[in-house]
Amino acid sequence: MGSTIAFWILAAVIVLAALGVITSKNLFRAALSLIICLIAVAGIFALLEADFLAGAQILIYVGAISVIIILAIMLTQNFSTANYTNRLIIPAALVALGFFGIVVYSIVKTSWNISVVSPTTPTTPALAQSLFSQSGYILPLEITAVLLLAVIIGSVVIAREK
């Protein structure tokens, strides 16, 4: 019963934060709403006992991606005085409504196999063993970290005033 209540609270937070992202006129507040939405998604992962996905959601999306978005907003000149009028709002709304209809149709028509058995072992130790063992993927992980650092430095160099 408690997990059902927690799910509905997190779902409401996700929907409200997503609405805050798309309706906010201030880009910084939209980014903060996105962070709230991503934290609530991590809460859903935790409710599903997907501990690795919840941790990755917090570290990667809430931590890294949100910081990059906020950094890009802060480095953009006159980000709060941007022009928000768009003549393509009606075609975009029609495409979004059509996509929503396709998603709802596919959800309703799919037969979902639900398992009532909860995983007995956490997923994080098994993933860590396969990632950090002798035959693991530690080198690609470190190369990705260096590549992301280079992207951040490059974006600061490109965005700075001349």
Image: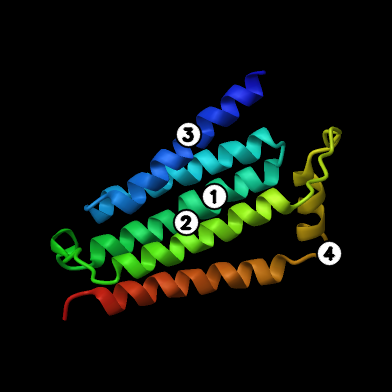
Location of residue 126 in the rendering, given as x and y in whole percent from the top left corner: 82, 49
Question: Which numbered disc flags the more N-terminal residue, 4 or 2?
Answer: 2
Location of residue 62 in the rendering, given as x and y in whole percent from the top left corner: 47, 49
Residue 7 visible in the shown view: yes
Q: Residue at x 75, y 67 (%)?
A: 137
Find disc 2 in the rendering and name its residue.
64
Mark 1 touching mark 2, by CB under 8 A? Answer: yes
Dot in front, 1 or 3: 3
Tag of residue 12 = 3
Q: Relative to residue 33, is residue 46 depicted above or below?
A: above
Q: Relative to residue 10, is residue 66 depicted above or below?
A: below
Dot in front, 4 or 1: 1
Q: How is the image coloured?
A: rainbow
Q: Callout 4: helix, strand or loop?
A: loop
Find disc 4 in the rendering and name its residue.
134
The Cα–Cα distance between marks 2 and 3, rounded to whole angstroms, is: 24 Å
